[in-house]
Image (cartoon, grey):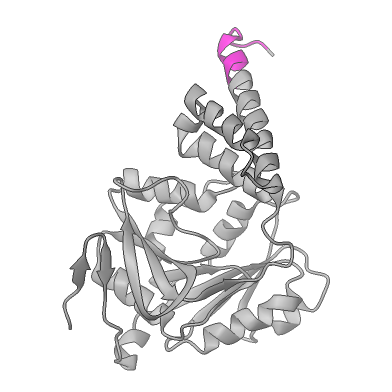
Amino acid sequence: MAALKHCSNIIHMPIYKNGDTMRSRAYTALIRTFNSQRTLGSTLEALERQSVAPRTYVFVDSGSTDQTLALVPKDAIVHHYKEERFNYAESLNQGIAYIETPFSMVISSHTSLENDRALEYAMALLDENEDIAAAYFVQELGQNMRFERIDRSNFSGFNGAWNTCAVYKTHLLKKRFFRPEVFSAEDQEWSNWAINNENMCIAKIVGAGMSYKNPSGNSVSKSLNERLAVAIYVRNEMLGFRYLLRTLYRAMRPRSSVKERIINLALLYSLISHNLAAWRSRRSPKGSV
């Protein structure tokens, strides 16, 4: 097997061409669905084109009313989400309970991969590196895939695994599930655990051409919730005075877009509200309501 080539923090790795060897590195595709008829077909077609297709599909459906479930492969496991109130982390946890393969691929029903050897590359990467807990794909498409290690030295709270399209070592997902109380950015909180508690790293793979086509797009509320969750559960320094001032500056500076101003103003309000609620909780006598 060819040696890995190191270049600063970017590591170039050869593509593995032995299909029989790669097929022994089995993975399950875990897909949460909700009225995903418009995009799920493209997601499944891209997975079937992979040099190593999923051994199993697990779908967690939260009440689709369109033709989503008609697109599901016949031998797939379909789990109907059980809680009254939807929680994305909990939906993934319910699906993970069915997974028995060494690797678990969490992929959005709005996502597809352009490079047909992307999963082959990711599993070889995880298999050959004991210190890598998970690998995820970004949108850039190139002739050669490469990866960057995200560890304690460069983890920002936002560059950990993305559940839009990520591959995990299953035993680690079962060792520590996604926390349901983390209302957004559950993947960043899990990455923080893997990096700081397990002393492992996350691989960011460039060149696979990940395509994300969520009809609802990246809404203001989604961006706000992700930043707020990171502040509360991953980067507590974002609750501090200096970060609050930086957020205010971003909301006021002329070159900020209208959307960015709205997000930062809402984030500033949410961070201050959280700090006030935490302060009141600490000040309240024990046992008081």
At x 45%, y 36%, the residue is 235
Q: Quadrant of the C terminus?
A: top right
- Which residue is more in the foreground, 96 or 168? 168
- Which residue is more in the foreground, 205 or 140? 140
x%, y% of residue 183? 62, 44
x%, y% of residue 155? 37, 48
Q: Quadrant of residue 152?
A: top left
Q: Number of callouts in the render?
A: 0
At x 52%, y 36%, the residue is 231
- Locate residue 114 relative to residue 284 in the image: left or right: left
- Which residue is more in the foreground, 198 or 212? 212
x%, y% of residue 226? 59, 46
- Locate residue 255 relative to residue 82 in the image: left or right: left
Q: Residue furthest top?
A: 285
Specify whether residue 53 is painted magenta. Answer: no
Q: Residue furthest right?
A: 65
Span of residues in magenta: 278-288
At x 47%, y 72%, the residue is 140
- Locate residue 235 relative to residue 277 in the image: left or right: left
The answer to whether residue 234 is visible is yes
